[in-house]
Image: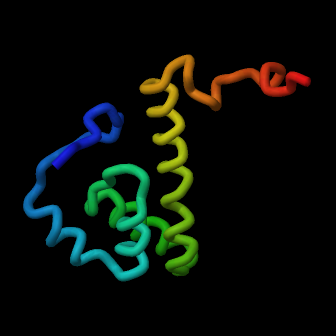
Amino acid sequence: MTRNTRASLQMRARGNPMSACDRLPPELRRWFAGAALPWSARLTLRIWHRALRGDGSPEAAVARLLPPEVTMVTRDAARILGATNPSRRSSSSSQSP
């Protein structure tokens, strides 16, 4: 199995990760299956419970997981791609005639 060892997300071995994923609520499990980064079930469940305390909406809880993932993907892209990262290019270079 190939791992993304260049991502900044810490990897920790804690028990059986598949059984931890299987115990996630269905809405969270759907998000987890399509996540861009290798999140831990424990971390996503912690964010999920914190979000549910706010308004109790599963949709809002899933939406709360998106900003941290976008931040980490952007940070990792800058670190991994460096100068070739499209988000680092200036807007003036993309406006050529």
Is 85 above or below relative to 21?
above
Image location of residue 21, percent across then percent down: 24, 70
Residue 14 in percent (x, y) is at 12, 55
Q: Name the outermost residue toward the right.
A: 97
**Residue found at x 10% / y 63%:** 16
Q: From the viewer's perspective, tell me whether residue 97 is left or right of residue 64.
A: right
Q: In this view, does 83 lie above or below 43?
A: above
**Among all residues in the image, which is located at the extreme left?**
15
Q: Residue at x 55, y 22 (%)?
A: 84
* Quarter location, residue 9: top left
Q: Which residue is drawn at 8% across and 60% down?
A: 15
Number of labels in the image equals 0
Residue furthest to the front? 97
**Residue in front for this viewpoint, 55 or 66:** 66
What's the image's color scheme? rainbow
Instruction: Classify residue 3 as left or right of residue 57.
Output: left
Q: 18 or 14: nearer the eye?
A: 18
> Quarter of the image holding residue 96?
top right
Quadrant, the C terminus? top right
Q: Residue at x 12, y 49 (%)?
A: 13
Vertical order, 30 against 9 (above or below): below
Tell me: 70 left or right of 36. right
* Residue 46 x/y as whole percent: 35, 62
